[in-house]
Amino acid sequence: MAKKTLTTIILLALIISVALWLKIPVGNVIVPVRSGDSARDVAMHLESSKVIPSGKIYLLFLRAIGADSKLQSGLYTFTPRFENFLTITQKLTSKNSGNKIKITIPEGFNSLQIAQRLEESGVAKQTEFNSYVKENNLEGYLFPQTYYFSPGQSLKSVVENMHLEFYKNFTPEMRARAQEIGLGEQSVVILASIIEHEAVQANERPHISSVFQNRLRKGMRLESCATVLYALGIHKEKLSIADTKTNSSYNTYLHSGLPPGPICNPGIDSLRAVLYPAQSDDLFFVSIGFIS
């Protein structure tokens, strides 16, 4: 009797799905399945991505064949209209079918932006990533580049990959150079993170670095618009005079010296600009249109 019921459910699901399948457009669709997603989450995501006509029916199908607890995280490519519940489920339950997940982290992304990109790609949950980075003080040390993560890769492993990449690029020679010019590693990263956001063109970085380091040596405030934006927590094309009075330890218009931590994750060019600034006595550089 149980076998007949199971067969009936499967046949009913297939009949209804065939009737609805014609409404699904042709073309490849990429669907991320995140670690921790339930079978219901996956079914509803497949429906919203127009891979299947009904998430509720597909969920019943998964439960009927006992596959609802066997779904694997990863990034999956489907071709609607040319797949059915069985082929979709075969992909979702095979440990080897999820593609490597390609993630590009641009220079200057802060940890919140990285977290959003990781969640959108099905690699990690934003809240979990943000908590881990904050607890381990890793802002500034998540190196910007293109990564390829395995489906289901642990959060710790994802973060460690980015962190280890920082030290692959920030070489012992660079650390020796930092000591030579009297800067600690943390100071280098903080200053590089500010330069990353202040520079419009790559060749501006060494001069901006020179200006900031000259101001630091003279005990002047950096007065960096980038730190004000970080303090505000929002993006603005132009800052107002009132913005520069924002009460924050990151606001270098109000506080002397470097802010308490990096404001983003800088790339190699900004790190090098700190270590090898242009030779100048300048105390200012022009940032067109930043303050109105």
Image (cartoon, rainbow, N blue to C red):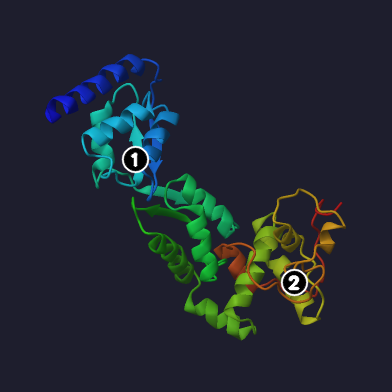
Q: Quadrant of residue 15?
A: top left
Q: Quadrant of residue 265?
A: bottom right
Residue 249 to residue 97: above or below: below
Question: How busy is the neighbourhood of tag 1: few (under 14 within 10 Å), some, or many (20 plus)?
Answer: many
Nearer to us in this view, 44 or 217: 44
Left or right placement of residue 105 versus residue 18 in this view: right
Residue 280: mark in rendering: none
Looking at the image, is mark 2 or mark 1 nearer the viewer? 1
Task: Tell me the amino acid under the disc marked 2.
Answer: Phe
Residue 155 in the image: state x and y as whole percent.
41, 60
Residue 138 appears anywhere in the view:
no
Residue corresponding to mark 1:
39
Residue 251 in the image: state x and y as whole percent.
76, 66
Q: Of label 2 and label 1, which has the lower sequence position?
A: 1
Image quadrant occupied by the N terminus: top left
Q: Quadrant of residue 179?
A: bottom right
Residue contact at pointers 2 and 1, CB within 8 angstroms: no
The residue at the point 29 percent across, 31 percent down is: 60
The residue at the point 41 percent across, 48 percent down is: 102
Residue 180 appears anywhere in the view:
yes
Question: How busy is the neighbourhood of tag 2: few (under 14 within 10 Å), some, or many (20 plus)?
Answer: many
Residue 212: mark in rendering: 2
Task: Tell me the amino acid under the disc marked 1.
Answer: Ala
